[in-house]
Image (spheres, coloured by chain):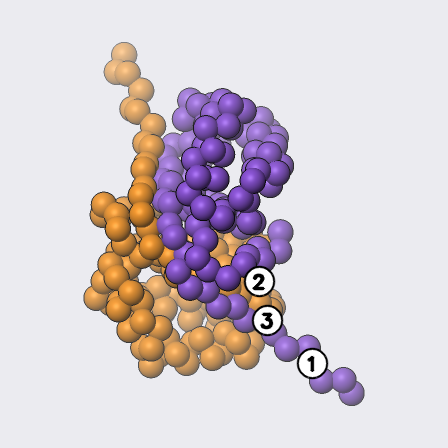
Chain colours: A purple, B orange
Amino acid sequence: MPLASTPEPPYYAVIFTSARTGDDASAYEETARRMHELASGRPGFLGVETAREGLGITVSYWADEESIAAWKADAEHAVAQERGRARWYEAYTVRVARVERAYAFTRPAPDAP
Amino acid sequence: MPLASTPEPPYYAVIFTSARTGDDASAYEETARRMHELASGRPGFLGVETAREGLGITVSYWADEESIAAWKADAEHAVAQERGRARWYEAYTVRVARVERAYAFTRPAPDAP
């Protein structure tokens, strides 16, 4: 997964950090893939970045708080959230944050010989 | 690393996402460890969560923007940032965001027999 390309701030970030139970891993992976696909098609979706190394961190970026609330309430997403609490997560935290400023670095291409 | 325990919002998050070159990995790891140690002792530091899976994501939490600016300007941190651009990172993005709301889930303990 590449770094997300997002517009100039302000926009919103949903920081989802989690510890997994390890149960039911293949259903979890399939649901995570499907949620990524569904979220990507929602109005206001700007991008997502995710990594897991023991702890899992997924940061999704959104145009505004309304888009975040609508995605949270999506019916298929609500079912996945419920299953997450029932089976997949030991614990998680969701933080909704307003991105106020951002800057990026990209390595310059090496000089041509 | 456990999930970070943070106070009631508002507070600030610095979302640092990166792609590594793979160069000089042991010096990178040692510097990352040292930066974690230094940041943890700074005024206004509230916690940090990190994971790498190809993409790296580190989210640090801070009481206010002044604490973030002071940490960015720390002399030893500035040297590490410069070395990061010179050797360790293909690309990175830093986003400074104000956490407006948060909620958490912890799995209930199983019933006693």
User: Is the same chain shared between marks 2 and 1?
Assistant: no
Where residue A94 sits in the image (x, y, percent)? 38, 40
Tag of residue B19 = 2
- Can residue A78 be seen from the camera position used here? yes
Furthest toward the top, the residue is B113
Amino acid carrying label 1: it is Pro
Q: Quadrant of residue B30?
A: bottom left
For this view, does A73 lie left or right of residue A32? Answer: left
Residue in the foreground of this view, choosing between A37 and A23: A37
What secondary structure is marked by label 1?
loop
Chain for mark 2? Answer: B
What secondary structure is marked by label 2?
strand
Chain for mark 1? Answer: A
Residue drawn at 24 percent across, 59 percent down: B63
- Residue at mark 2 to residue at mark 3: CA–CA distance: 10 Å
Up-down relation of residue B107 to residue B34 (above or below): above
Furthest toward the right, the residue is A113
Residue in the foreground of this view, choosing between A23 and A95: A95
Amino acid carrying label 3: it is Thr
Amino acid carrying label 2: it is Ala
What secondary structure is marked by label 3?
strand
Tag of residue A110 = 1
Where residue B50 sits in the image (x, y, percent)? 42, 54
Q: Residues within 10 Å of mark 3 (few under 14, many from 20)?
A: few
- Can residue B16 be seen from the camera position used here? no
For this view, does B6 lie left or right of residue A109? Answer: left
User: Is the same chain shared between marks 1 and 3?
Assistant: yes
Tag of residue A106 = 3
Where residue B101 sits in the image (x, y, percent)? 31, 43
Which mark is in front, 1 or 3?
3
For this view, does A95 lie left or right of residue A51? Answer: left
